[in-house]
Image (cartoon, rainbow, N blue to C red):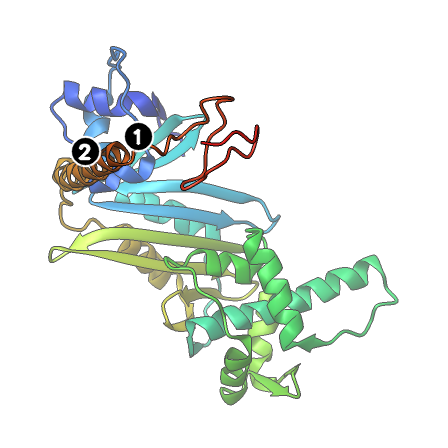
Amino acid sequence: MNKITYSISKNTVLSAGKHFGIQANRFAEYFGFTESSKSTEIVEGWEDLLPLILKPRNFTGMTALFEDDSLLFTNIVTGEEDAAFCGEEDDILKVMPMSQSEIIELLASYLGEPEDRQKIKQELSGDALICLLSIGDSIKRAKLENILDPSKIEFEITDKILQNEFLYNSEGRNLRWASAFLADLRWKEKPINFEKSLKELSKAGIIIYRDSRVELSENGEIFFDELLKRKTILGLRSVFYHEGVINYLAMALMRTENYLWFLDVTDNACIMSLNYEELKGMIGTMISPGEEPPEIEADEEVEQTISKAKMKAETKAETESINKDRENPTTPKFCRNCGEKLSIGSKFCKKCGNKI
């Protein structure tokens, strides 16, 4: 797919927008634009591009983990009718305009179309779903260790092992492990109760959990067999307005050997197999435009009001402090002899010993 890619410095976007009379909305703040005092040289094509960058109706962050463990990070902005990929390199925005349908087709092609399979759906809490992926990661790690050292043929999975491995991978943002990848998509970071999650998986018949040890059950084999054959995971985090309220969505779409999977990232989550059309529908839902967000200017007025109030409070506090010092002229801030800073209420200088 050969598409034109535009390059624009992040610190010229706002001034270029003003040149065309375009006021940035709240979602444009996700790019971290800064305004430059230098004059901006307008490039042909920007007049069509800037409204999409500065006034998106949907902002989606995308992370893709491929079969070779390579990672791709980019953003997708959607306007009322058009859309674009927006990557970043050394404070230069790389923008590739595309239609929404083209983006849907491209992202779906990263995962590929599987053969028709039986429908599988398992409802779980968000923590239990991450715990399920953690078990898959632990099995994968053990198999990799066995390849490096064939004498290692036995391994065990315990709640402590799972928790420690997950914390190590997630805190280091090692997104090449599925559990850390999914946890990173959450809009709000929170700790995972592995003991509670393992009990939930055991109750669902996916594992057997007793005496802190985890064993795989026959009903759960389908999940762990497929997790070991993971090909591509696509993570999407979207923000948009609906009925005047800002909405935050997150999901992962995963291709394994035989299935396409939808992984919900909400508190009431699920893992569910998809067909190819359902996959494209999910992607379309995530990047579809919402209502027009408020402009940054409206938010800035609030910030300025807060800033002014804060400045008044600080000025008042400083004035009170000065007045207090005037009321107590016998307590200087610095030693008259050596210049050492004095503690409040000091009678002697700690450095030279002179009486104050």
Query: Badge 2, how many Cα within 10 Å: few under 14, some, many 20+?
Result: many
Tell me residue 297's x, y (percent).
Answer: 14, 35
Quadrant location of residue 274? Answer: bottom left
| Mark 1 touches mark 2? (CB < 8 Å) | yes
Compare residues 203 and 46 and report the one nearer the observer: 203
Query: Dividing the picture into quarters, in which one does residue 298 lie?
Result: top left
How crowded is the residue under tag 1: few (<14 C-alpha within 10 Å), some, or many (20+)? some
Q: Which residue is mark 1?
A: 33
Quadrant in the picture for the C terminus = top left
Q: Which residue is mark 2?
A: 24
Residue 183's place in the image compared with 308, above or below, is: below
Q: Secondary structure at mark 1?
A: loop
Res 311 seen here: yes
Residue displayed at 34% across by 63% down: 278
Residue at 58%, 66% (x, y): give it: 227
Q: Quadrant of residue 263?
A: bottom left
In the rendered structure, which amino acid carries the disc numbered 1?
A: Phe
Closer to the camera, 341 or 266? Answer: 341
Say whether residue 5 is left or right of residue 323: right
Quadrant of the image for the N terminus?
Answer: top left
Q: How far across and how far down the image is residue 70, in percent?
A: 58, 44
* Of the pair 344 and 18, the residue shown nearer to us: 344
Q: Earlier in the sequence, mark 1 or mark 2?
A: 2
Residue 208 % position (x, y): 61, 87
